[in-house]
Amino acid sequence: MLTITLSAAGYTAVFAPANGGAILSLKKGDTEIFHHLGTDEQILAKPTSYGLPLLFPPNRLDGGTFTFEGVKTTVPITEPARNTSCHGFLHTRPWQVAGYQESEDTAEIHLVFEGDESTDFYQNYPYEFEAELIYKIDKDGLHQQINLTNLSGKNMPYGLGWHSAFAIPGWDLNKAKDAKVRVSVGKRIMVDDRMLPTGEVKDLIPEEAEFRSEAGGSPLFRIMDDHYTVEPIERDGKPFHGAVLTDPDGRYEVVYRVDDFYKHWMIWNCRQEGSFICIEPQNWRINAPNLDLPREESGLDVLADQETRTICADVCLNELK
């Protein structure tokens, strides 16, 4: 797998442009922030379990299809037993490198994907668009910006998310169960055995509510593959939308701040495997285009022709001692 490695201000990131434009690794010093312990073959077989892959559209669609303003989208079924598509198509497509640069204090890379009639999925998602990913590294960590532009001549519905696979602090010391995680979850969105919303939304149980507390909750308190609404928590006296993972020995914390564009979370801990947890921001609720909900609740977003949407996020590691 061809990769590009950039370093600046104590951070090192490894990018895989041909593998969905994903970040495979982000380190500060010797501390790995993302889950990355896989061979090339393992990463290519399951790209959503490593690093920071893009989901477009995120999560599942019932029957892999929806119709918006008379235009039908049909995403191939990837979960036949559930009759659902999962995680879209951009995380497996090659992106073009528009440029990159590196210095002692900063590094930056620009990746571009052109969705048009020449792409193999155009017949399934018949919209022309451009996606640009800009990553910058400096003393404050990794800064992510995605610019999405509709070039289709019609309104374009879109779903966007990230399968953010964080290494659980303390896993290297066999203390992952003692790590603490804070996440700006609001309420639990109930799903059925096909992982599609039932329409029921519940208050958090006590263990989930701990994710909102100042101390945080355990990332391994149970097997998690759970869907949530967003409600900011407080950090440093200010509203915060994101996640904070704290090392059980107090060595460091990882801070993941995301744009309020992302109205939903998915949290998956790989059946309590122990080394990583995916804390996944996404703009829309699972199966949003097929839900009988107002857009402000479902999170279904629409770009007008020639409109660009810019969404940002940041990741940093703060040493605590």
Image (cartoon, rainbow, N blue to C red):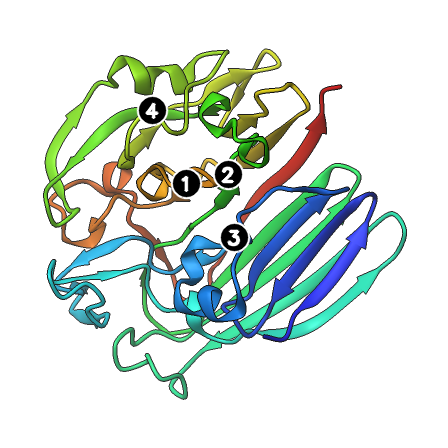
User: What secondary structure is marked by label 3?
Assistant: loop
Do tag 3 and tag 2 residues touch (Cβ < 8 Å)? no
Amino acid type indicated by mark 2: Asp
Amino acid type indicated by mark 3: Leu
Alpha carbon separation for disc pair 1 and 4: 25 Å
Amino acid type indicated by mark 4: Phe
Q: Give how far across and how far down residue 231 sits, in percent.
A: 38, 23
Q: Give how far across and how far down residue 112 sits, in percent.
A: 58, 70
Do tag 2 and tag 1 residues touch (Cβ < 8 Å)? yes
Alpha carbon separation for disc pair 2 and 1: 6 Å
Q: Earlier in the sequence, mark 2 or mark 4?
A: 4
Do tag 2 and tag 4 residues touch (Cβ < 8 Å)? no
- Residue 259 is tagged as 2
The answer to whether residue 25 of the structure is visible from this angle is yes
Alpha carbon separation for disc pair 3 and 1: 16 Å
Instruction: Give the labeled residue for mark 3.
Output: 52
Q: Look at discs 3 and 2 and give the one toward the viewer.
A: 3
Closer to us: 169 or 215: 169
Alpha carbon separation for disc pair 4 and 3: 24 Å
Alpha carbon separation for disc pair 3 and 2: 16 Å
Closer to us: 265 or 40: 40
- Farthest residue to the bottom: give it: 118
Instruction: Give the labeled residue for mark 1.
Output: 262
46 to the left or right of 32: left
